[in-house]
Amino acid sequence: MLTVNTGDILREQGEGKGEGNGEGKGEGKGEGKGKGEGVGVGVGVGNTALLEAKLGSAHESLRRGTCAGAAFTQWLTWPQAYDRDEYRRIKSAAGRIQAEAKALVVVGIGGSYLGTRAVVECLASPHYNLLPKTTPDIFFAGNCLSAAHTQEVFDLIGDRDYAVCVVSKSGTTTEPAAAFRLFRAHLEAKYGKQGARGRIYAVTDRERGALKALADKEGYETFVIPDGTGGRYSVLTPVGLLPIAVAGIDTDALLAGAGRAMEAWNAADASSLDTNPAWQYAAARHTLYRQKGKCTEILAFYEPRLRFLGEWWKQLMGESEGKELGGIFPATADLTADLHSMGQYIQQGLRNLMETVLLIDEADTPLAIPYDPDDADGLNFLAGKTLHDINRRAFEGTYLAHTDGGAPNIVIRVPRLDAYHLGGLLYFFMLSCALSCLMLGINPFDQPGVEDYKTNMFALLDKPGYEAEGARLRGRL
Ligand code: PA5
């Protein structure tokens, strides 16, 4: 497991010679040296001593629970401290859903949905529902207010047996609440109130919120979103684990990978840029942002099954860091597809970009280009090469082009895309994100800006208690 890959390509090409200047010594640390849990980062990180001091104090405040938003740091130890009894209940509920349903509708938005979809797409498939399989199809609803999308989920389920997993920490978010009302009504019409009760699973707060009250009243099986974990840090809690287990994914391995990462990267001897990939990543983006004005970060990947991991990452980074008129704007690029669209901008647009490339080292299939004696398409120079190798050359070529064009690259390498390594990677991003925010003096765990639109929407929808605000807002439209 302790595969460390620190971006040899980058070293060979002279990248990572250090971004640090103006903050002390000015000589950067040029090589990613992570002895990580299967995640290595290759990048120049800047003034090592100063960055290590900042990271040390950020990490210490996180570990000790003295940082901003400290009440929401339960995710830090969760991969080992999770509730074993509840985990057993999750597995048995997943088994029941698999036995009784041909489809599961996961109702939730933001942190109550993106992590689940990311893991399912990474480890099962982006085309999971189209695959021949013994596990239920999984549909996502309540992540938008589109009538067409919601109706389509009903249509795709058809008359098949299904279950619903509704996820909402607050229990009051409009999108999932509205979708859940629709699916609950449909289930009750289909199975009767009692039958529906056995097919609804609620993942919500331990005691607060409308969903919790409804679940208690109706007798739904409930699972708890831990008090000390915000939505975007909750993928390894029941929020993600129940639907992920329904998809037949190895949740033990997912938690084990995160748990190993947690142990390794929070250990005392990991308080160093030499040994801690989460520190390296946080240091690199901090340096590029603060020293070089790179205020947009593009997470680029060469594997389409990472697309929703990118969506999850965007929420994690954007909602955690984008505050107080600052923070790095997170975007994604699905390569090589986006090289034929976004690539132009990355190469020659505004030079405020950094690119973080998420590389999966191991090919999961040996698919290779066949030899063609006619060679009418002129492709015999690729004959015998695997698509994975060709993809790797695409990365190398792109890396050279983009760095030549002034878009510095951070490279995160993961040995393979399995549950264990994905668990470690999820933890890696959450830890790096929290450290990045704390280095900037930002609370990583609140989202005051998200509340503003919710309040406006409630007012415009005439929610009781918001009437005066509604009238005022309508006057502005
Ligand atoms: O990260 C967060 O806290 C948010 O994205 C929430 O997950 C999102 O707003 C959904 O909230 P809730 O789970 O309360 O419905």
Image (cartoon, rainbow, N blue to C red):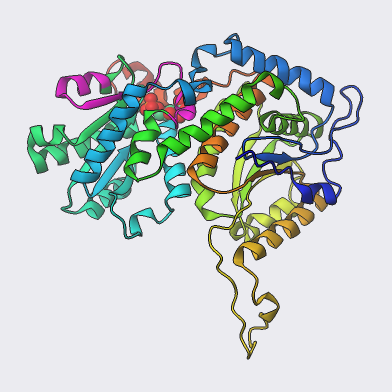
Asked if the stretch drawn in magenta spans residue 391, the answer is no
The N terminus lies in which quarter of the figure? Answer: top right
In the rendered image, the vertical position of residue 441 relative to residue 40, given as above or below:
above
Residue 26: which quarter of the image? Answer: top right
Q: Is residue 469 visible?
A: yes
In the rendered image, the vertical position of residue 242 relative to residue 10, given as above or below:
above
Q: Which residue is drawn at 72% across and 35% down?
A: 34
**Quadrant location of ligand 1?**
top left
Q: Residue at x 32, y 39 (%)?
A: 106
The magenta region covers 212-236
Query: Is 292 situated left or right of 342 in this image?
Result: right
Q: Which residue is drawn at 66% across and 30% down?
A: 278
Query: Is 204 situated left or right of 416 in this image?
Result: left
Asked if the stretch drawn in magenta spans residue 218, the answer is yes
Query: Is 282 situated left or right of 130 in this image?
Result: right
Where residue 204 appears, as percent x and y from the top left, is 32, 24
Q: Which residue is drawn at 43% across and 53% down?
A: 125
Where residue 230 appears, as percent x and y from the top left, is 46, 23
Where residue 402 appears, as percent x and y from the top left, is 76, 52
